[in-house]
Amino acid sequence: MLKIYNTLTKNKDAFTSLNKDFATMYCCGPTVYNYAHIGNLRTYIFEDLLVRTLSADMPVKHVMNVTDVGHLTSDADSGEDKMELGAAREGKSAWDIAKFYEGKFFEDFDSLNCRRPTVTARATEHIKEMIALVKKLEEKGYTYKTSDGIYYDTSKFPSYHNLVGRAHIDGLKTGARVDFNDEKRNASDFALWKFSPTDKQRQMQWDSPWGVGFPGWHIECSAMAMKYLGDTLDIHCGGIDHVAIHHTNEIAQAEGATGKKYVRYWVHGEFLIMTNGKMSKSSGGFVTVQTLKEKGYSPLDYRYLCLGAHYRTQLEFSYEALTFARNTRLGLMERIAALKAETDGKIQDEAGLNAAKTAFKEAMDDDLNTSKALAVLWEFVKSRAAAADKLDFLKYADGFLGLSLLEEEAQKPLPKEAEELLALRKEARAKKDFKTSDELRDKLSALGIAVKDTPKGQEWRWK
RNA sequence: GGCGCGAUGGCCAAGUGGUAAGGCGGCAGUCUGCAAAACUGCUAUUCGGGAGUUCGAUUCUCCCUCGCGCCUCCA
C-alpha cells in the first residue's frame, strides 16, 4: 500500500481511501493562455505516477481542471487579464485562445504518456457552481464587499494557517513586497468574485447576484473538485507554489462552506529549475515539449529524466542531463529488443520474478521513489534471469513508469541511398574486403546510421 | 523584511545512527578482422564548512556559507 508525503501533516502517511472501493484525486490543471513549459509538465508527470501507482491498488477517480477564465495578473491592481492579454497579443478572442492552448496542452500531456483524467473540468463551464459556493460562504458570513469585488474574510476561518503555518500568515502583514488593496480587511483576504471594470468591456464575464463580473481564481478548484468528488477528497495535488496561497484558500472556501474536511492528503511536486532559477511563463525563456522535439529528443526522454529524481526535490534541467536520460532510455529499449529476440515466452523463475515486482512496487509505494524503483529495474534487467522473466517484469514496471518500453518505436524509413550502402557492405564483408566494409560503415555513420556485425550478419539502427 | 526547502563521485541521483543504491560517462579485459552491442572488473575511506550529542553521524542538534522557492499570476 502507498505511503505518501502529506503537506498537511508534514509526514509520509499511509494512504487509505475514504470510499471503500475507489480513491478520489483532484489535480490543479493548466491555465491555458500560452504553451505549457516542461516545468509545468513535470508536475503532471508526477501526478500521473501517483495515479498509476494508486491504480495498482484501487480505481482512481481523477479530476483535473482547465483554467480557461482569465485572471488578473495581480491581486493589487484591477488591471489586465492574462487570457484577454493573450487574445490581444494574437488578435483572437479570449475564448479562441483558451481553446487553442488547451488543445496544445493535451498534445504535450499525451506525448508524455500521462493518462487522461477521468474528468476534465473547464472553469468557464462551472460558473454556476462557483456562484453557488460564494453564495453559501456569503450566507455563512465569511464574505464582504469592496468596490471591486466580493472578498473572503480569512480572519473568520480560524484554521486558515493550517497548511502553510501561522508564522507565514502572520508574516504577510509585516513584509509585503506589494501594495495591498486597502479595502481588504486582512492581508491574506482574497477575491471570490470580481466585478467587471466599468470603463472596459470584458470578453469573459457573467451575471451574478453581486453584479456582472468573473470568478476569483481560487473558487474554481473548490467548486469543481466538490462537484465531481464530494465534499471530502482523498488527494489533492499541485505544484509546490500553490501551497501558501491557492490551496490554503481552497481549504478556506470549501471548509467554510461545508464545515467538513476538504482534503485528506495534500501532495505537492517540486519545481524543475534552470541554472538561473525556476522556469516560468512570466519570466520568459521557457522550454516546451516542442523545443525538445526540435532538438531531437523524445518527450519520453524528458519523462525518464523526471523519473530519475524524487518528485519532492528540485530537479535542475540541462540538455546534458536530458542527453543522459535519452542514452539510458534508448539503451534500455535496445536491451528489450534483444530480449524479445531471444525469448521463448516461458517464465522460468516465478518466485524470482515476483520478488522483483514486489521490490519495484515497494519503491513506488514509498512516496513514489522512482529513483529507487529504477534501480530495482536495472538490477533485474542486468541479472541472469531469463528473457521471458525480464520482459514480464518490464511490462509490469512500465505500467507504473509509463515509458512505453515494450512498444516498438516507429523507425524512420531507411533512405534508398543507405539501403544501397548496406547492400554493398554486405557484399564486401562476404568477400572479407574489410577496407571497403569499414569505409561503408563510415559513410553510413555520416548518414546517422549505426551498423554492427553480429553472428547473424550486419544490423543497423538510427543513432 | 517574513516563511520554507535543499547542498551526496565527472554528470543525474537514492539512502541510512554503524561506516555510501542505480543510471550516464570514463578506464581495463573478454568477444570482434577492427568496431559496435553484450559480459567481467575498476571508477566517492567519503556525503558544502565548523562545532556539539553519541561507543559511533553522511544520517540528530546548533552556527556559517552557498543555491532555490513562496510572500504577486505561476507547476
Image (cartoon, coloured by chain):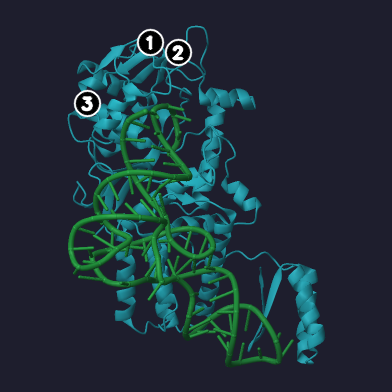
Chain colours: A cyan, B green
Mark 2 secondary-structure assignment:
loop
Subunit of label 1: A
Proximity of marks 3 and 2: CB atoms separated by less than 8 Å: no
For the N terminus of chain A, the image quarter is bottom left
Proximity of marks 3 and 1: CB atoms separated by less than 8 Å: no
Q: Residue at x 35, y 59 (%)?
A: A369
User: Label 1: few (<14), some or many (≥20) within 10 Å?
Assistant: few
Q: Name above or below for residue A154 compared with residue A402.
A: above
Q: Is residue B35 left or right of residue A253?
A: right
Q: Residue at x 80, y 70 (%)?
A: A417
- Would you say residue A93 is visible in this rendering? no
Mark 3 secondary-structure assignment:
helix
Between the residue at mark 2 and the residue at mark 1, the CA separation in whole angstroms equals 8 Å
Mark 1 secondary-structure assignment:
loop
- Rendering coords of residue A107 (x, y %): 54, 46
Mark 1: amino acid: Gly
Subunit of label 3: A
- Which residue bears the numbered disc 2? A196
Mark 3: amino acid: Gly
Marks 2/1 same chain: yes
Mark 2: amino acid: Ser
Proximity of marks 2 and 1: CB atoms separated by less than 8 Å: yes
- Would you say residue A329 is visible in this rendering? yes
For the C terminus of chain A, the image quarter is bottom right
Between the residue at mark 3 and the residue at mark 1, the CA separation in whole angstroms equals 23 Å
Q: Is residue A18 left or right of residue A197?
A: left
- Which residue bears the numbered disc 1? A211
Q: Nearer the viewer, residue A129 or A47?
A: A47
- Rendering coords of residue A262 (x, y %): 23, 36
User: Label 3: few (<14), some or many (≥20) within 10 Å?
Assistant: many
- Which residue bears the numbered disc 3? A256
Mark 2, mark 1: which one is toward the viewer? 2
